[in-house]
Amino acid sequence: MPHSAAMAQAKKSKFWPQPWWMRAIDKKKLVKKLRARDGDNCWRCGHAMRFDGLPNIGKYRTIEHLKPRSQQGGWALENLRLCHIGCNRHLGTHTPEHKEKMRINVGEG
Ligand SMILES: [Zn+2]
Protein backbone atom coordinates (compact mmCIF):
# COMPACT_ATOMS: atom_id res chain seq x y z
CA MET A 1 0.00 0.00 0.00
CA PRO A 2 2.02 2.97 -1.21
CA HIS A 3 -0.36 5.50 0.35
CA SER A 4 -0.01 4.39 3.98
CA ALA A 5 3.69 3.81 3.46
CA ALA A 6 4.01 7.46 2.50
CA MET A 7 2.07 8.43 5.63
CA ALA A 8 4.36 6.39 7.86
CA GLN A 9 7.34 7.98 6.20
CA ALA A 10 5.94 11.46 6.73
CA LYS A 11 5.27 10.74 10.40
CA LYS A 12 8.80 9.52 10.93
CA SER A 13 10.38 12.50 9.25
CA LYS A 14 11.50 15.02 11.86
CA PHE A 15 13.24 17.53 9.67
CA TRP A 16 10.76 17.93 6.87
CA PRO A 17 7.29 19.41 7.34
CA GLN A 18 4.34 17.13 6.92
CA PRO A 19 2.55 17.29 3.59
CA TRP A 20 -0.30 19.80 3.45
CA TRP A 21 -2.99 17.12 3.39
CA MET A 22 -1.81 15.74 6.72
CA ARG A 23 -1.62 19.16 8.28
CA ALA A 24 -5.14 19.88 7.05
CA ILE A 25 -6.46 16.78 8.81
CA ASP A 26 -4.60 17.60 12.02
CA LYS A 27 -5.93 21.14 12.07
CA LYS A 28 -9.50 19.96 11.72
CA LYS A 29 -8.98 17.66 14.69
CA LEU A 30 -7.40 20.47 16.67
CA VAL A 31 -10.26 22.83 15.90
CA LYS A 32 -12.70 20.17 17.07
CA LYS A 33 -10.85 19.75 20.35
CA LEU A 34 -10.52 23.48 20.88
CA ARG A 35 -14.22 24.01 20.19
CA ALA A 36 -15.08 21.32 22.70
CA ARG A 37 -12.91 23.06 25.27
CA ASP A 38 -13.53 26.75 24.54
CA GLY A 39 -16.78 26.88 22.59
CA ASP A 40 -17.57 28.68 19.36
CA ASN A 41 -16.59 32.18 20.38
CA CYS A 42 -13.44 34.07 19.63
CA TRP A 43 -10.85 33.97 22.40
CA ARG A 44 -10.00 37.64 21.99
CA CYS A 45 -13.31 39.39 21.36
CA GLY A 46 -15.83 36.83 22.54
CA HIS A 47 -17.97 37.02 19.43
CA ALA A 48 -19.12 34.02 17.42
CA MET A 49 -16.81 32.66 14.77
CA ARG A 50 -17.62 31.13 11.41
CA PHE A 51 -16.62 27.52 10.95
CA ASP A 52 -17.85 27.10 7.40
CA GLY A 53 -17.87 29.05 4.20
CA LEU A 54 -14.92 30.88 2.77
CA PRO A 55 -11.87 31.17 5.02
CA ASN A 56 -10.98 34.58 3.64
CA ILE A 57 -13.62 36.45 5.62
CA GLY A 58 -12.85 38.30 8.83
CA LYS A 59 -15.23 36.29 11.00
CA TYR A 60 -13.71 32.97 10.06
CA ARG A 61 -12.00 31.02 12.82
CA THR A 62 -8.29 30.54 12.93
CA ILE A 63 -5.89 28.89 15.34
CA GLU A 64 -3.98 31.38 17.45
CA HIS A 65 -0.66 30.39 18.97
CA LEU A 66 -0.49 32.04 22.38
CA LYS A 67 3.23 31.59 22.28
CA PRO A 68 4.30 32.16 18.67
CA ARG A 69 5.82 29.28 16.81
CA SER A 70 8.91 31.42 16.33
CA GLN A 71 9.36 31.33 20.14
CA GLN A 72 9.07 27.58 20.58
CA GLY A 73 5.32 27.81 20.83
CA GLY A 74 4.12 24.45 19.64
CA TRP A 75 0.90 22.80 18.68
CA ALA A 76 0.02 21.66 22.20
CA LEU A 77 -3.59 22.42 23.00
CA GLU A 78 -2.69 24.60 25.98
CA ASN A 79 -0.82 26.90 23.61
CA LEU A 80 -3.71 27.18 21.18
CA ARG A 81 -6.80 29.35 21.11
CA LEU A 82 -9.50 29.79 18.51
CA CYS A 83 -10.09 33.32 17.32
CA HIS A 84 -11.09 35.37 14.30
CA ILE A 85 -8.61 35.88 11.52
CA GLY A 86 -8.79 39.62 12.19
CA CYS A 87 -8.27 39.13 15.93
CA ASN A 88 -5.37 36.80 15.31
CA ARG A 89 -3.72 39.42 13.16
CA HIS A 90 -4.32 42.01 15.86
CA LEU A 91 -2.73 39.83 18.56
CA GLY A 92 0.31 39.40 16.36
CA THR A 93 3.44 38.16 18.09
CA HIS A 94 2.94 39.75 21.49
CA THR A 95 3.79 37.76 24.60
CA PRO A 96 1.05 35.51 26.04
CA GLU A 97 0.78 37.90 29.03
CA HIS A 98 0.25 40.86 26.74
CA LYS A 99 -2.29 38.97 24.67
CA GLU A 100 -4.23 38.17 27.83
CA LYS A 101 -4.54 41.92 28.39
CA MET A 102 -5.65 42.49 24.82
CA ARG A 103 -8.72 40.36 25.32
CA ILE A 104 -12.05 42.13 25.22
CA ASN A 105 -14.54 41.08 27.84
CA VAL A 106 -18.00 40.73 26.41
CA GLY A 107 -20.98 39.75 28.52
CA GLU A 108 -20.97 36.96 31.05
CA GLY A 109 -19.93 38.87 34.03
ZN1 LIG B 1 -12.57 38.04 17.49
Image (cartoon, helix red, strand yellow):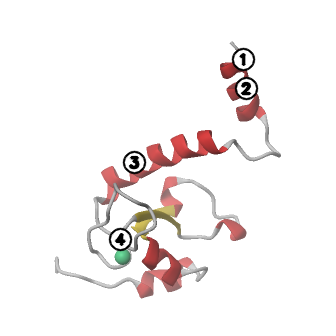
- Residue 17 % position (x, y): 74, 47
| Cβ of mark 2 under 8 A from ligand 1 | no
Q: Which residue is mark 1?
A: 2
Quadrant placement of the N terminus: top right
Q: Which residue is mark 4?
A: 59
Q: Is tag 4's residue or tag 3's residue first in the polypeptide sequence? A: 3
Q: Give SS at disc 2.
A: helix
C-alpha span from label 2 to label 1: 6 Å
Please give the name of the residue rendered at 60% of the width and 40% of the height, measured from the top-left corner.
21
Q: Is tag 1's residue or tag 3's residue first in the polypeptide sequence? A: 1
Q: Which residue is mark 2?
A: 6
Q: Nearer the viewer, residue 94 or 61?
A: 61
Q: Is tag 4's residue or tag 2's residue first in the polypeptide sequence? A: 2
How crowded is the residue under tag 4: few (<14 C-alpha within 10 Å), some, or many (20+)? some
Of labels 2 and 3, the one closer to you: 2
How crowded is the residue under tag 3: few (<14 C-alpha within 10 Å), some, or many (20+)? few
Count all numbered tags in the image, as a single digit. Answer: 4
C-alpha span from label 4 to label 1: 39 Å
Q: Give SS at disc 3.
A: helix
Of labels 4 and 3, the one closer to you: 4
Work out whether 32 lies above or below 43: above
Which numbered tag is attached to residue 39? none
Q: Disc 2 residue type?
A: Ala
Assess whether mark 1 and mark 4 are in contact (beta carbons under 8 angstroms).
no
Outermost residue, right side: 15
Assess whether mark 2 and mark 4 are in contact (beta carbons under 8 angstroms).
no
C-alpha span from label 4 to label 2: 36 Å
Of labels 1 and 3, the one closer to you: 1
Q: Disc 4 residue type?
A: Lys
- Residue 36 % position (x, y): 31, 50
